[in-house]
Amino acid sequence: MTNRIRVEFELEKDTPTSMSFAEVYAGLENIWYRFSADPAGNVELWATPNGFEFLARYFLKLARTPKVSGYHSHAALEFSEGPPMGEPELTIGVVEHPESSA
């Protein structure tokens, strides 16, 4: 028999060209994540439990809110509630079809 986790919350519906983040952060403390890549192209993602919760809410909003193709956002590769950690960027974008990605 498998154990199950029930997830239930509400997200604000965004416009096709903008995103509201208030409920993505709501109730979360110690949000931290870091993406990194090596020269071979391997990508790592490390996060606190609330960092993963933040990312899950973020991606769920992108999946469930109609966005125009090309909508994108920029964030630091390492995110925390403190000061920015570095210069490289994480860009997350929406496309209609994989071949239309940049």
Image (spheres, rainbow, N blue to C red):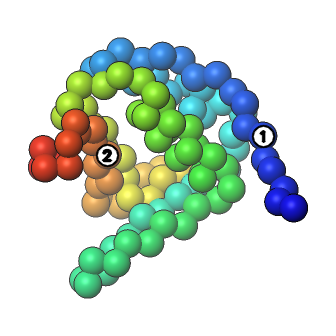
Residue at horizontal 12 percent and vertical 44 percent from the top: 100
* Kind of residue sitting beneath label 2: Ile
Q: Is residue 18 visible?
A: no
* Viewer-nearest residue: 85 or 12: 12
Q: Position of residue 85 (x, y in %)?
A: 42, 59
Residue at horizontal 68 percent and vertical 56 percent from the top: 49
Q: Relative to 61, does residue 4 appear above or below in the rendering?
A: below
Q: Position of residue 60 (x, y in %)?
A: 51, 36
**Residue 78: assigned label:** none
Q: Name the residue tied to disc 1.
A: 6
User: Gap between marks 1 and 2, in whole Å?
Assistant: 27 Å
Quadrant of the image containing the N terminus: bottom right
Residue at horizontal 27 percent and vertical 77 percent from the top: 41
Give the mark count.
Answer: 2
Q: Earlier in the sequence, mark 1 or mark 2?
A: 1
- Going by the image, does 52 lie left or right of 58? right
Residue sitting farthest toward the right: 1
Q: Quadrant of residue 56?
A: top right
Q: Name the residue tied to disc 2.
A: 92
Q: Position of residue 14 (x, y in %)?
A: 42, 18
